Image (spheres, helix red, strand yellow):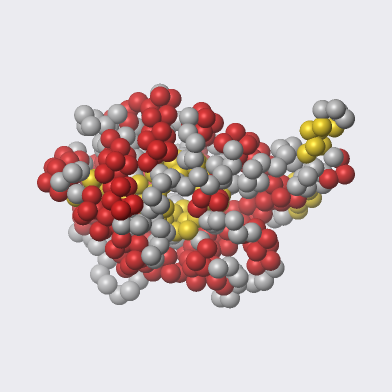
C-alpha cells in the first residue's frame, strides 16, 4: 500500500486553476499580495504533514484576439500575478519541514541564472526547494512581452529544455568538489582552489565557460519536477524528472499517461517506480457530505462560459466562444493558418481530440466539461471518509504517488484538508502518523538513492523507441 504524498498547488495571484472563487466570503485569496497570507498557508501545511507547497508561475496572461480580455481583468482569471520565488526564504524561516517548489521556464533566463537562483534558494531553505521545469506557458503573450518575433515550436522547446537542464546540472555538480569549502578562519582559507573546476559546455542552444559561483547547497540539485503530459513532455519527464505533475482528466486516460511515463523511464535505464507521480486534485471536505455538497454548489454557481473560454484561450490560444459550438476542435483545421494551435497548451488540446476512435466532444461539451474545472485535475467532495475512499481508489487505479491539492476557497479548503482529511488518511495508514522529519525535500519525497549518478549512466545509452 503506497503512502500518499501531499503537495498544494498555488499561484501568487487571486485564485487557482483559472476558475472564479476569490469573491466568495470563504476565500481570502485576494490577499495574495500580503506576506502574512502566505505565512499562514505555509504554517497550516507544515503542521498538517504536507510535503511541499508548489507555486505555478509565468509571465503570460490570457489573450483573446491578441489582447487581454475584459473577463480576465474583471474576474482575476490567471491575471494578475506576482513572482512567488521571492516568498520562499520568508516561508522557509516560518516552517520546519515543508518543502517549496517553484516553476521556472527554460525559455527565458540562461541556465547559469536559473542554476544560481535555485542553488541560493536551496541554501536559504536548508535543502527544501524543488524546481518545476516548464518550457513555457501562455507562450504567445510571453513572446510579445519579451520582444520575440516568433513563438518557438512546442517540441523544439523541449529539445532546448533537455540541454538547458544538462548545463544546469553540470554547474551544480561539477564545479565544486564536496570538500572544496573549508571556511577556515584561522588559516584565512574559504575554499580550496584545487577543488574548484571550470565548466566547459558547448551545446546547440547554450554555451558556458567558467566557474559556478555558488558553493554546494544541502541538496546540490533542487528536486526536479516536471509538468506536462504531451508526448514530448512525457519523454522529457522520463529522462529528467524525479517528480511529475500530470493532468487529471479521466481515470483511464490519466492511468495511461502514468504508465507511459514509467515505461519511458525504464527505457532510459531508470527504475520506473522511483519517479513520484502526482495529479492535481480539488477537494471539498466537510464534516458531512451535505455540507460539502453545499459548498461545491456555491462554487459552481460562480462559473460562466466566459470564464472558461478566457482560461482556455490563455492556455491554448483557442477562443472557444469564436467556434461553432456544435462541432469539435477539428474545425480549427478548416483554416489555412492554425496560428498558435498545437504549439502551446498541447495537453489541453489533446484531451479533447480522442485517438482511440471515440467521438470527440463538441465545443459546447468542452465548455460544460471545463466549467468549474478549468485547469484543475480530479474533483472530489464529501465527508472525510468519502474523500479518503476516493483518494485511495485513484491511487490504486492510476498508480499514483500522491496529489497536488488545488484549493477552491483559499486557505479555508487547506485548513479543512489538514484538520479533517489528513487524520483520516493517517488512520488508514496512507500517511505517516506524524510529519516526516527528513532533512531535505529529496529525502522526504524520494529517499536517499543516488539518482544523479544513475541518470548520468542512463544518459549514455539511447532509450528504446526514441
Q: Residue furthest left?
A: 290
Res 330 visible: no
Direction from residue 183 to residue 432 in the image, left or right: left
* Residue 163 in the image, given as x and y percentages of width and height: 65, 55
Q: In the depicted view, which residue is nearer to us: 438 or 155?
A: 438
Direction from residue 126 to residue 10 in the image, left or right: left
Please tell me whether residue 438 is drawn above or below residue 117 in the rendered image. below
Please tell me whether residue 99 is drawn above or below residue 169 in the rendered image. above
Q: Which residue is depicted at the point 47% across and 40% down?
A: 98
Give the quadrant of the C terminus.
Answer: bottom right
Give the quadrant of the N terminus.
Answer: bottom left
Direction from residue 355 to residue 165 in the image, left or right: right
* Residue 407 in the image, given as x and y percentages of width and height: 31, 41
Q: Which residue is depicted at the point 35% across and 71% down?
A: 355
Q: Which residue is depicted at the point 69% across and 66% down?
A: 457
* Residue 396 in the image, given as x and y percentages of width and height: 34, 66
Q: In the depicted view, which residue is nearer to us: 199 or 330?
A: 199
Please tell me whether residue 278 is drawn above or below residue 372 in the rendered image. below
Res 201 visible: yes
* Residue 280 in the image, given as x and y percentages of width and height: 36, 52
Direction from residue 212 to residue 80 in the image, left or right: left
Q: Quadrant of residue 113?
A: top right
Q: How many labels sit on residues?
A: 0
Q: In the depicted view, which residue is nearer to us: 331 or 23?
A: 23
Amino acid at each position: 500500500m503506497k503512502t500518499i504524498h501531499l503537495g498544494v498547488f498555488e499561484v501568487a495571484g487571486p485564485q487557482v486553476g483559472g476558475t472564479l472563487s476569490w469573491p466568495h466570503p470563504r476565500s481570502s485569496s485576494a490577499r495574495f499580495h500580503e506576506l502574512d497570507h502566505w505565512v499562514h498557508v505555509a504554517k497550516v501545511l507544515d503542521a498538517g504533514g504536507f510535503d511541499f507547497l508548489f507555486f505555478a508561475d509565468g509571465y503570460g496572461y490570457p489573450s483573446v484576439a491578441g489582447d487581454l480580455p475584459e473577463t480576465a481583468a474583471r474576474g482575476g482569471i490567471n491575471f494578475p500575478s506576482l513572482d512567488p520565488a521571492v516568498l520562499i526564504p520568508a516561508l522557509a524561516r516560518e516552517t520546519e519541514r515543508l518543502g517549496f517548489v517553484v516553476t521556472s521556464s527554460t525559455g527565458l533566463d540562461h541556465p547559469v541564472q536559473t542554476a544560481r537562483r535555485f542553488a541560493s534558494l536551496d541554501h536559504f531553505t536548508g535543502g527544501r526547494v524543488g524546481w518545476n521545469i516548464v518550457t513555457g506557458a501562455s507562450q504567445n503573450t510571453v513572446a510579445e512581452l519579451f520582444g520575440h518575433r516568433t513563438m518557438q515550436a512546442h517540441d523544439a522547446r523541449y529539445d532546448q529544455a533537455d540541454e538547458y537542464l544538462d548545463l544546469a546540472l553540470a554547474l551544480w555538480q561539477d564545479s565544486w568538489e564536496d570538500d572544496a569549502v573549508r571556511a577556515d578562519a584561522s588559516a584565512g582559507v574559504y575554499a580550496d582552489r584545487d577543488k574548484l573546476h571550470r565548466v566547459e559546455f558547448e551545446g546547440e542552444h547554450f554555451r558556458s565557460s567558467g566557474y559556478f559561483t555558488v558553493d554546494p547547497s544541502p541538496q546540490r540539485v533542487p528536486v526536479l519536477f516536471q509538468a506536462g503530459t504531451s508526448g514530448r513532455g512525457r519523454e522529457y519527464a522520463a529522462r529528467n524528472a524525479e517528480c511529475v505533475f500530470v493532468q487529471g482528466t479521466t481515470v483511464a486516460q490519466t492511468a495511461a499517461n502514468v504508465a507511459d511515463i514509467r515505461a519511458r523511464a525504464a527505457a532510459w535505464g531508470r527504475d520506473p517506480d522511483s519517479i513520484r507521480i502526482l495529479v492535481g486534485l480539488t477537494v471539498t471536505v466537510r464534516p458531512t457530505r451535505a455540507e460539502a455538497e453545499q459548498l461545491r454548489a456555491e462554487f459552481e454557481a460562480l462559473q460562466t462560459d466566459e470564464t472558461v473560454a478566457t482560461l482556455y484561450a490563455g492556455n491554448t490560444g483557442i477562443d472557444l466562444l469564436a467556434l461553432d459550438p456544435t462541432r469539435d476542435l477539428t474545425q480549427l483545421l478548416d483554416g489555412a493558418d492554425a496560428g498558435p494551435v498545437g504549439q502551446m497548451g498541447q495537453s489541453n488540446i489533446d484531451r479533447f481530440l480522442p485517438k482511440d476512435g471515440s467521438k470527440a466532444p463538441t465545443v459546447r461539451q468542452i465548455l460544460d466539461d471545463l466549467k468549474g474545472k478549468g485547469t484543475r485535475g480530479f474533483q472530489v467532495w464529501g465527508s472525510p471518509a468519502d474523500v479518503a475512499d476516493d483518494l485511495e481508489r485513484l491511487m490504486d487505479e492510476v498508480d499514483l504517488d500522491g496529489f497536488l491539492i488545488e484549493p477552491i476557497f483559499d486557505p479555508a479548503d487547506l485548513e479543512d484538508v489538514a484538520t479533517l482529511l489528513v487524520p483520516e488518511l493517517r488512520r488508514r495508514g496512507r500517511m505517516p502518523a506524524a510529519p516526516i522529519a527528513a532533512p531535505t525535500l529529496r529525502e522526504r519525497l524520494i529517499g536517499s538513492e543516488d539518482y544523479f549518478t544513475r541518470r548520468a549512466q542512463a544518459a549514455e545509452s539511447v532509450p528504446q523507441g526514441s
